[in-house]
Image (cartoon, rainbow, N blue to C red):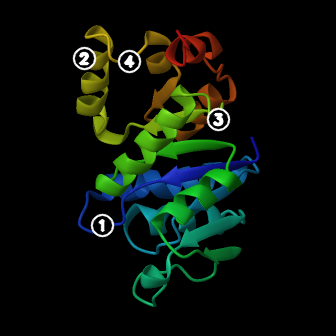
Amino acid sequence: MKSICVFCGSSDSVSPDYLAAARQTGRTLAERGLRLIFGGGKTGLMGAVADGALEANGEVIGVIIPSMNTSALAHTGLTRMDVVPGMHERKARMHELSDGYIALPGGFGTFDELFETITWAQVGAHEKPIGLLNVKNYYAPLLAAIDHAVSEGFIFEEHRAALCCDSDPGKLLDAMANHHHPHEAVKRWMRQD
């Protein structure tokens, strides 16, 4: 892995623990020589993860849409900022630039990006590792819902097992480095009969 895309919230009205974890994630990526790809914002966890990487002399690429590319929202001082026409192009560009994906705590946008990335892996569109940084057990309810979907037969166990999860960014990256894409599960999911 050379580039990690981080999906995360942009709200400033969150626990300082989330902001600290985002900053540490950015710092850890930079210390490991991994390029950060993110949504280009300067607020909330988005700004904190970028700041952490920049403080550790990391390479940071933001991908943003014109309506968000404002002085109030866009992060300045990045290695590069890509401005793309719309949200679909934004996600596609972030996917194109990344070798793996981490979801930090966030809201609808983070969930959307996370689930699209998981779905693309499920159907074989990519084989890149996906991780959840489970700060303050934020993702416990979501993981419980996913586990329920597995038990009800909607998700293959192999696809669930491929989703890495840890509260420590270093340990999460270690797990992602050992990722094994569930090829056989993809074949079963995409069966032609």
Tag count: 4
Residue identifier under label 1: 11
Q: Position of residue 157 (x, y in %)?
A: 43, 11
Circles 2, 1 touching at the beta carbon (< 8 Å): no
The CA span between labels 3 and 1 is: 30 Å
Q: Amino acid at mark 2?
A: His
Residue identifier under label 2: 148
Residue identifier under label 4: 155
Task: Name the image quarter holding residue 93.
Answer: bottom right
The CA span between labels 2 and 3 is: 25 Å
Q: Position of residue 145 (x, y in %)?
A: 24, 25
- Viewer-nearest of labels 2 and 1? 2
Nearest the viewer among 75 and 68 is 68
Q: Residue at x 46, y 29 (%)?
A: 165
Nearest the viewer among 176 and 29 is 176
The CA span between labels 2 and 1 is: 29 Å
